[in-house]
Image: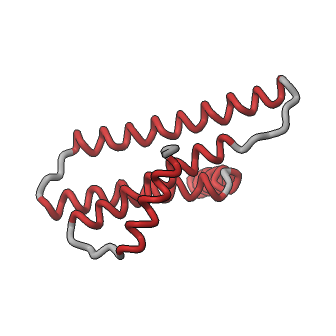
Amino acid sequence: MINGNIVKIVGAFISSMWASLGFILQSLLMLMGIDILLGVLVAIMKGTLDTHISFIGIIKKCIILLVILAVYIGFRAASLTYNLPYIPIPEATVGYFLVHEVISIVNNADKVGIPIPAFLRKALCKIKKVSDGQ
């Protein structure tokens, strides 16, 4: 009975944390998970699976999340300290990384011969140029 209650408590905690993240951050986390899974599947299909490379990719995704956290804390503190209106820079930062995750997913699918529609390639190229400030 105690183990069942612990599972319920942990599940409720994780559920409440997930719900508090907001849709854009939830989307980024889901896309990161898809990208990791797809990267592993592509590596298996190509016979190039390497745990070190996978680990480096996961570390990079953790660093991205830490950058987003730092941006959120910094801009939130600045807006409170200087009584400024909230500017959605943290959300724009998440959006930037979200676009790059989608591009990575599409590139991974392309590596194993999944046909990618030309309109999608073109749209992602335009979005990447805008997000990179070009």
Location of residue 27 in the rendering, given as x and y in whole percent from the top left corner: 56, 58
Above or below, comparing residue 124 to residue 67 in the picture: below
Location of residue 77 in the rendering, given as x and y in whole percent from the top left corner: 76, 27
- Which residue, as the protein is rendered here, is positioned at the far right? 83
- The residue shown at (32%, 73%) is 116
- The residue shown at (51%, 53%) is 98
**Residue 1 in sight here:** no
**Depth check, front residue: 113 or 15:** 113
- Number of marks present in the image shown: 0
- The residue shown at (38%, 67%) is 121
Location of residue 112 in the rendering, given as x and y in whole percent from the top left corner: 21, 67
- Which residue, as the protein is rendered here, is positioned at the far left? 47
Above or below, comparing residue 96 to residue 68 in the picture: below
123 sits left or right of 76 in the view: left
**Residue 25 in sight here:** yes
- The residue shown at (16%, 64%) is 45
